[in-house]
Image (cartoon, rainbow, N blue to C red):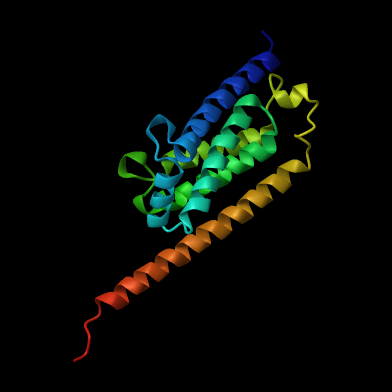
């Protein structure tokens, strides 16, 4: 087996593994599969975490994970798929950052790893055993890499900053409600 064949088989395995994990998490959010909350349950959770409005946030997150995951596994539109999944994982990381790095303490280790892996595949390309190659890379052009990642990063920044403002507003409103009345 040549070095190129080994690399492409390894990339295929990495794409499938990462894609299936992402797609599974996305379908939990979108459809309630695999013990997930579905749109309604996920929307309620997202509201509580400060992603408001919760329903559009749940749909966007589910689509980034499920759509990005399926596309990564198939090796189709690798730059867009990797960027979408990485952007979704950036939002997930924002929830877990206060708990530190390691997953056992509720930290951001797991979404960071999934996002990093998806982004790496998006930059590297899907490899020889992919639909991108079968379609002559019509959805995987060099210019698509910076466009996809800049778009995803901009969207993630807007969403994460909006969440931070929402949480700060909630905290301030709670502090105001807790102040004793003069009387």
Residue lying at the far left of the rendered structure? 183
Residue 155 sits in quarter: bottom right
Q: Position of residue 19 (x, y in %)?
A: 55, 29
| Relative side of 149 to 36, left or right | right
Residue 12 sits in quarter: top right
Q: Nearer the viewer, residue 138 or 8?
A: 138
Q: Taking the image as drawn, is residue 123 in sight?
A: no
Q: Nearer the viewer, residue 25 or 123?
A: 25
**Residue pictured at 72% horizontal, 42% vertical:** 145
| Relative side of 94 to 14, left or right | left
**Residue pictured at 25% horizontal, 75% vertical:** 178
**Residue pictured at 57% horizontal, 53% vertical:** 156
Q: Position of residue 92 (x, y in %)?
A: 46, 47
**Residue pictured at 41% horizontal, 30% vertical:** 34
Q: Is residue 73 above or below residue 112?
A: above
What is the number of callouts on the image? 0
Q: Position of residue 165 (x, y in %)?
A: 47, 67
For the N terminus, the quadrant is top right
Q: Taking the image as drawn, is residue 21 in sight?
A: yes
Q: Nearer the viewer, residue 72 or 47?
A: 47
Residue lying at the far bottom of the rendered structure? 183
Residue 41 sits in quarter: top left
| Relative side of 113 to 104, left or right | right
For the C terminus, the quadrant is bottom left
Q: Position of residue 114 (x, y in %)?
A: 51, 36
């Amino acid at each position: 087996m040549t070095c190129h064949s080994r690399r492409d088989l390894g990339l295929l395995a990495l794409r499938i593994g990462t894609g299936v994990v992402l797609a599974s998490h996305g379908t939990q959010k979108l459809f309630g599969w695999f013990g997930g909350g579905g749109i309604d349950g996920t929307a309620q959770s997202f509201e509580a975490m400060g992603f408001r409005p919760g329903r559009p946030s749940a749909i966007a997150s589910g689509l980034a994970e499920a759509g990005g995951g399926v596309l990564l596994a198939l090796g189709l539109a690798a730059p867009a798929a990797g960027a979408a999944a990485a952007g979704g994982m950036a939002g997930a990381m924002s929830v877990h950052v206060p708990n530190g790095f390691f997953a056992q303490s509720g930290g951001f280790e797991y979404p960071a790893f999934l996002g990093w892996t998806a982004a790496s595949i998006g930059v590297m390309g899907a490899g020889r055993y992919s639909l991108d190659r079968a379609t002559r890379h019509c959805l995987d052009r060099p210019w698509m890499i910076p466009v996809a990642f800049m778009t995803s990063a901009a969207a993630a920044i807007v969403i994460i900053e909006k969440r931070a403002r929402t949480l700060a507003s909630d905290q301030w409103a709670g502090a105001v409600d807790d102040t004793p009345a003069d009387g």
